[in-house]
Image (tube, grey):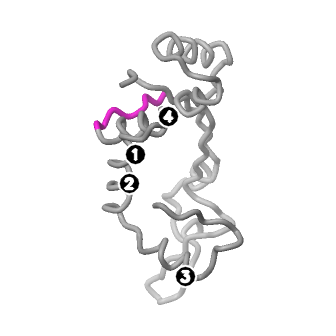
């Protein structure tokens, strides 16, 4: 928590120590951060501790810049944030999900003990529908600021 890790001092030992971190270590750090002088860090840590997480809106089309700006302005009325700080509280992006990837087929054993692609083994699965990627756009912003 108190060490600065850079490309110069990163080693296999650093990776080993990092891999030993668990949920309790992370939660302890978050408890410390809620009292930090940095407004963004302390506010986000408090939101996690209080389970007052960001609201997430999801839709098929990208959110309009006007809609995102409306959320940003609403938050700025409540709290005086710089544009840089605001990016931690109001942000959008997209997620992509593909249930079945035919490039990496799922194989099953047949009754005869042979491996067969599940798409060829079952005529009941409509894998064409599952191979189409689903893209959703999301917008995150605070329900309320603490």
Q: Is residue 43 left or right of residue 62?
A: left
The residue carrying mark 2 is 29
Give the residue drawn at x 47%, y 89%. Answer: 112
Disc 1 + disc 4, Cβ < 8 Å: no
Residue 118 position by quadrant: bottom right
Q: Can residue 116 be seen in this view?
A: yes
The residue carrying mark 4 is 40
Q: Magenta region: which residues?
A: 50-58
106 drawn magenta = no
Which is nearer the N-term, disc 4 or disc 3?
3
Which is nearer the N-term, disc 2 or disc 4?
2
Is disc 2 placed on a helix, strand or loop? helix
Q: Report the residue that reaches farthest toward the left.
A: 50
> Residue 97 location in percent, x, y?
58, 49
Disc 2 + disc 1, Cβ < 8 Å: yes
Q: Can residue 59 be seen in this view?
A: no
Is disc 4 placed on a helix, strand or loop? helix
Label 2 to label 1, Cα distance in Å? Answer: 6 Å
> Residue 142 location in percent, x, y?
44, 25
Which class describes the residues within 10 Å of circle 3: few (<14), some (14-19), or many (20+)? few
């Amino acid at each position: 928590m108190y060490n600065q890790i850079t490309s110069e001092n990163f080693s296999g030992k650093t990776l080993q120590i990092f891999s030993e971190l668990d949920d309790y270590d992370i939660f302890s750090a978050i408890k410390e951060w809620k009292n930090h002088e940095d407004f963004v860090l302390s506010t986000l840590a408090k939101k996690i501790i209080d389970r007052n997480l960001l609201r997430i809106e999801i839709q098929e089309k990208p959110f309009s810049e006007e809609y995102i700006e409306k959320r940003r302005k609403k938050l700025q009325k409540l709290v005086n944030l710089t544009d840089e700080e605001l990016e931690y509280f109001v942000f959008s992006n997209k997620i992509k999900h593909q249930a079945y990837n035919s490039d990496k087929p799922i194989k099953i054993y047949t009754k005869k003990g042979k491996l067969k692609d599940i798409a060829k083994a079952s005529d009941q699965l409509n894998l064409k529908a599952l191979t189409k990627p689903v893209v959703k756009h999301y917008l995150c912003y605070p329900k309320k600021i603490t």
